[in-house]
């Protein structure tokens, strides 16, 4: 006697909702951009590259360049500033791992993703006022723009965490 499986007996792969698929694809794209951005920051945060940027700015505003140079010296002595681009890369990779797990219906991926999205803001808090000093020329409203950008980032992260939480029912424990 032969064991012939009917189509009812063949295990069907789990079907991912279109909403979860779109969320994961968007997150994969953002993770790729985050990795590229982190690598660029690691390269640009060397003292040599920062000095080149200051010298370029000196042609526009000598006083502003002097202020930027003072900020750079202060920031180079700050251990959080030195490791922040590397932390950003780690957070992005952890976020990617969480999304990959959710893509594969693993609920733990949601918690990993949520933590990875919240952790970067702790680095900004630890850097204090230095977090926004190198964002652009001093004396202009760069701190305002940086704060607005940070607020938008927090909002987007919270929205994505909320949307992923709406898909937890699809994921295995």
Image (tube, rainbow, N blue to C red):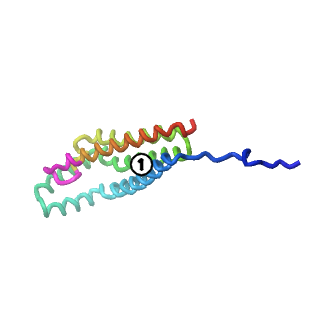
SS label for mark 1: helix
**Residue ID at (52%, 38%):** 108
**Residue ID at (81%, 49%):** 4
Left or right: where 152 falls relative to 172: left
Looking at the picture, tell me which residue is in the foreground, 11 or 153: 11
Please state the horizontal and vertical placement of residue 101, each as a whole percent of the image: 53, 45
Quadrant in the picture for the C terminus: top right
Q: Would you identify the image quadrant in which residue 161 lies?
A: top left
**Residue ID at (10%, 55%):** 63
Number of on-image labels: 1
Q: Is residue 72 magenta?
A: no
Q: Is residue 22 visible?
A: yes
**Dominant secondary structure of the residues highlighted in magenta in the image:** loop
Q: Would you identify the image quadrant in which residue 52 lies?
A: bottom left
Left or right: where 173 falls relative to 117: right
Q: Is residue 142 magenta?
A: yes
**In the rendered structure, which segment of residues is drawn in magenta?**
134-145
Left or right: where 66 falls relative to 130: left
- Label 1, on which residue? 92
Q: Is residue 115 visible?
A: no
**Residue ID at (36%, 55%):** 37
Please state the horizontal and vertical placement of residue 3, each as a whole percent of the image: 83, 48
Looking at the picture, tell me which residue is in the foreground, 154 or 96: 154
Q: Residues within 10 Å of mark 1 (few under 14, many from 20)?
A: many
Please state the horizontal and vertical placement of residue 157, each as a whole percent of the image: 37, 43
Please state the horizontal and vertical placement of residue 143, each as a whole percent of the image: 20, 46
């Amino acid at each position: 006697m032969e064991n012939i499986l009917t189509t009812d007996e063949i295990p069907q792969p789990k079907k991912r909702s279109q909403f979860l698929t779109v969320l994961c694809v968007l997150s994969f794209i953002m993770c790729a951009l985050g990795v590229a951005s982190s690598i660029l920051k690691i390269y640009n945060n060397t003292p040599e590259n920062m000095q080149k940027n200051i010298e370029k700015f000196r042609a526009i505003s000598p006083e502003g360049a002097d202020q930027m140079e003072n900020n750079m010296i202060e920031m180079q002595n700050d251990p959080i500033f030195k490791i922040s681009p590397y932390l950003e890369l780690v957070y992005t990779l952890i976020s990617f791992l969480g999304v990959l797990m959710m893509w594969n219906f693993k609920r733990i991926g949601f918690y990993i993703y949520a933590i990875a999205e919240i952790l970067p803001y702790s680095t900004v808090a630890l850097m204090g006022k230095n977090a926004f000093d190198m964002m652009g020329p001093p004396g202009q409203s760069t701190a305002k723009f940086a704060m607005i950008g940070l607020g938008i980032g927090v909002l987007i992260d919270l929205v994505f965490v909320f949307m992923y939480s709406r898909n937890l029912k699809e994921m295995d424990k």
